[in-house]
Structures are given as C-alpha cells and as structure tokens.
Image (cartoon, grey):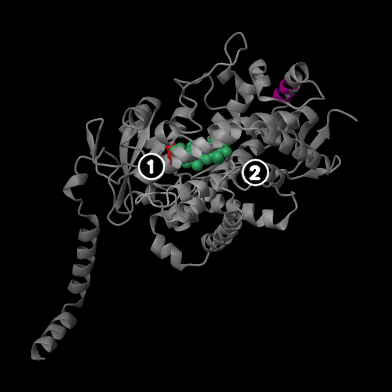
Amino acid sequence: MLFTVEIWQFVKSNILSVVLGIIALILWKNWSKPDHFSRLPPGPAPVPLVGNLLHIDVKEPYTYYLELAKKYGSVFTIWLSNKPAVVISGYEALKDALLTQGDDFSGRANYPVLMRVTRGYGVLASSGHRWRELRRFSIMTLKNFGMGRRSIEERIQEEARCLVKAFEEPNGGTFNPEHLLCNAVSNVICSIVFRHRFEYHDPQFRFLFDAIDAYFKVLSSPIGQLYNIFPKIVGLFPGPHKKMFKMVDKAQAYMKEQTVNRLMKLDTSSMPEDYIEAFLIKMLEEKDKANSEFSYDNLFSSIWSLFSAGTETTSSTLRHMLLIMMKYPEVQERVHKEIDEVIGPDRPPMMEDRVKMPYTDAVVHEVQRSMDLAPTAVPHKVMRDTEFHNYHIPEGTLVLPLISSVLADPQLWKNPNHFDPENFLDDAGHFQKNDAFLAFGLGKRVCLGEGLARMELFLFFTSLMQRFTFVGIEPPEEIDITPSCCSFGRLPRSYECYAKLRVQE
Ligand code: HEM
C-alpha cells in the first residue's frame, strides 16, 4: 500500500516526464523499424506515426508518387502511417514485378474498405490458394457463357437495343446519361450472374447499383483513403463511408436471397445457365473436399466482385467516351463516318466489325489510356519475402503498381498528355497495338473481365454512335474533361447532354 502511494506521488511530481515517456514509448513501438524493413527500396523520410501522409494529397495520391518516381526511380517506398508501401513505376519495372515475379506479387492488399466489404472472401479480395481457385473458376465460367448458345455478344447487343431506346426517350431534350449507362452495363453482369435483366426504372435495380456507385465514390474519395489508413479511428465517425457500408450490406443481402432461391430450384442434371448455378454445382461436387474454396462466403463475395469491378469501371469509361465525343466533334464525325461505311444504319454492330474500324478502335483505346481510370490498379501485396531489384520486400508488404506512369510515358506514346487517337494508329491509319496499354492491369491479377469489358465498350459505344450525335450543353471548348474524383479511381464527372437522332424513322 505504502509502495503504491509512493509511486503515485512520484508520478504526480513528474507528470510531464511521465507523459513524454509514454509518448516516446508509443512512438518507439510504432516506429522502430524491424530489421526486415532495413532493405526496403529508398523513399522520402517518414515522420513518426504519420509516415509520408503529410505530403500525400489524398485527393490525388498518384501525382505525388509520379513525382517521387522522378527522384527515386522505378521502385521506392512510401510510408502510410506506420506501414510501408512499395510503389512500382514504369513499364519495365512493372513487367519485372507482375510478369517475371508474378507469383511473388500476386497477393491482394488487405485494404480496410475492401476487407470490410468482403472479409477477404471472393475472387477480387483474396490471395493464394483461395484466389487461384476462384479466379480459375470465374474465368472458365465467363468463357463458357460467352461460348454458349446465347453468347455474351448477343446479350450485349440486346442490351444495347434497350439502351438506345432509353436514350431516345428525352426526345431531343437534355439528360444525364450516367444512370442509363450504368443500368445497361449492370444488366450484362446480372444476366451472367442471375440470368435476369432489370427494367431501367426497377427500384430493386436502383438500390443495387446505387450501392456500387457509393462504394466506388467512397473508395475514390479522401474519406476512403483515410479509412484505409486509419480504419478504427475513421470508422468511429459518421460520414459517407458509414452510409455506403449500410447500402452495400443491403445489396449483398439481396444477392444472398437470390442465391438461396436459386439453390431451392437447382437442377444438377442440366447444364448451369448462370454464374450462381455453376458455383452451386461446384459447391455440391466439392462438399466432401477438406480445403474446398467453394463456400457461400466465397460465392457471395465473388458475385459482389463481378458486380462492383464490372459495373462502375465500364460505365464510367462509356460516360467518358460520350464526353470526349462532345469535346472533340471532329473525332465524333470520323467515328460516325466509319460506322456509316462499315455497319450502316440498320443492323446492330458486331464484334467482327472492329477489325474494319481502326479509327473507332483507336478512339476506344485512347479514351481508356487518357482517362487512366485506375492509376494504381487494385493494390497488391507480396506473398512472401521477395528480392526485387536488389531490395528486400517483406511478406505482406503493400505494393502499388503505378499504372499512370506507363499510360502517360512520353517514351511510349506519341502524344501522352492529350486525348489523341493517333496514339493507337500507324502512319497508314491502321490500328497499332501497344503493349504499354495497361488500363486492365498486367500479369496474374490482370482484369478478369477484360474480354467482356472490351466487347461492352465497343458494342455499346458503336450502337449509341450509330443512332445519335452527342452535343454538350456548353460549347466544346468549355467542356471540362478532367475527372471528378482522382484517388483510387479517376471517375469522370457527371454531365447533361443532348443525344440528337442521326437516322430518322
Ligand atoms: C473498362 C472496364 C474495366 C477496367 C478498366 C478494369 C480494370 C481493372 C484493373 C486495373 C484491375 C486490377 C488489376 C490488378 O489487380 O493488378 C481489375 C481487376 C478485376 N476486374 Fe476489371 N476492369 C474493367 C471491367 C471489368 C468487368 C466488366 C469485370 C467483370 C466481369 C471486371 C472484373 C474484375 C475482377 C473480378 C478483377 C479482380 C481480378 C483478380 O483480383 O484476380 N472488370 N480490373
């Protein structure tokens, strides 16, 4: 007892020293870099507790990384609070990491927003054995539906017809195409996942993609960045992130309900007709296998992955394409001319038209290159202790592939800083492929829906352009094509436009 009183008196008389001592202890605990961090790539000196956060513009983090790449070269380290992140910049270094050492760099970072929504399940958020199994299954299933009786191409053409009709509804008045584009793209995934398409005004459909929209907007906003760095603290406060988590929970509950309904009616003797059925059949086949990854958790999260990764990306790109058409009427005119020559006014565009339409193909690629939708892809982590470019990156370290550095590299493009379809055309006007086109990522975790997305972009874009001329509510020179959010995703801004009928009935 006497001893306790003495301690208390000592604390009281040395209160300042005690507080400073505690702070020093916290700093030391959080900051003393363990030995395994000693051979990380170089980078700017971090400040205890916050790392390099004071220099990172949470609205546009990749611009700081691009600057650092000029100073430190193609591999460097930044500290997000007390955690290191290795940034890889430039085509050659990205190839070395994601292709040559693809297995080492194939992990998905445990980003708190992603983890809160998926709990590490599903094809997008998982790593290692789980991810490999789910990725192989998902690719095979998407391919099977594309190659089946009712191919993905036909489904997109059918949806494009509905989209064109919906664009006619404003009858020459202004409208915002954002929701319609999102509906159309979402419906393609819905038909693959649920074998069902929604009418564009169906309220059930609305809440599904409102949830996806909110998810991307939060991920691409400063609050999302802060949540990813300080999840426990930011999670305590109200804000758009809390609202978004509630919306996503509701959307996921709907997806679960759909799955249970489907399970009740499952006929294992016939061929699966959608992703859910194919997954449920696989679950039954593997029910006695000890380490099977075909579980409900992985099914629900994989469905969410396909929806979330496949909707906002493709519809944002289409939205940006129409904005570019309004900004550059001369480009729009050339696309119209090519459509008139190759497809004409009556039949629906087909994928086989693309090879005969080099200019339109170049426009689609150039929109993707110049908009740079995912400047740091979806962050990775290293799966094991990794030697890379003479540095040592410990297992589990966050890795940011700086895709922006390649998409705007002056060594790799004729005109890197402006929208210019010539970036994908040779002197004779033929389409010119460029391996540095990394809009879908690179290596083992390259976008799983790339083939589907390319079809959607070409077919939706040409179907709309076949029927309409797009005009902005401002003159072209005043149209702003800079994105509205620029962190995780560079999402294009919302706008009103006119869709003027080209072909009169
Ligand atoms: C213009 C459209 C699209 C773009 C620009 C895009 C871009 C990307 C990028 C950059 C990644 C990350 C690659 C990495 O981790 O290094 C990715 C991953 C992914 N994408 Fe896409 N994507 C698009 C459309 C789609 C579509 C339509 C689907 C749906 C089928 C889809 C499904 C996925 C999935 C599931 C992943 C995660 C793959 C994995 O972790 O193994 N994406 N996408």
Magenta-span inclusion, residue 272: no
> Tag 2: residue type?
Ser
Q: Residues within 10 Å of mark 2 (few under 14, many from 20)?
A: some
Q: Against 415, is 19 above or below? A: below
Q: In what element is the residue under mark 1?
A: strand
- Residue 310 appears in view: yes
Provide the residue span drawn in magenta.
331-335
Residue 68 coordinates in the image, percent (x, y): 36, 36
Q: Do the residues labelled 2 and 1 touch (CB within 8 Å)?
A: no
Q: In what element is the residue under mark 2?
A: helix
Image quadrant of residue 187? Answer: top right
**In this rendering, would 200 be left or right of 21?**
right
Residue 384 coordinates in the image, percent (x, y): 26, 42
Q: Mark 2 points at which residue?
A: 191
Of 145 and 457, nearer the camera is 145
Q: Quadrant of the N terminus?
A: bottom left
Magenta-span inclusion, residue 332: yes
Q: Which mark is on residue 380?
A: 1
Q: From mark 2 to mark 1, how far is it between C-alphas?
A: 30 Å
Q: Against 93, is 18 above or below? A: below
Q: Is mark 2 within 8 Å of ligand 1?
A: no
> Tag 1: residue type?
His
Q: Which mark is on residue 51?
A: none
Q: Does the residue labelled 1 lie within 8 Å of ligand 1?
A: yes
**In this rendering, would 50 be left or right of 360?**
left
- Seen as rendered, the residue at the extreme bottom is 1
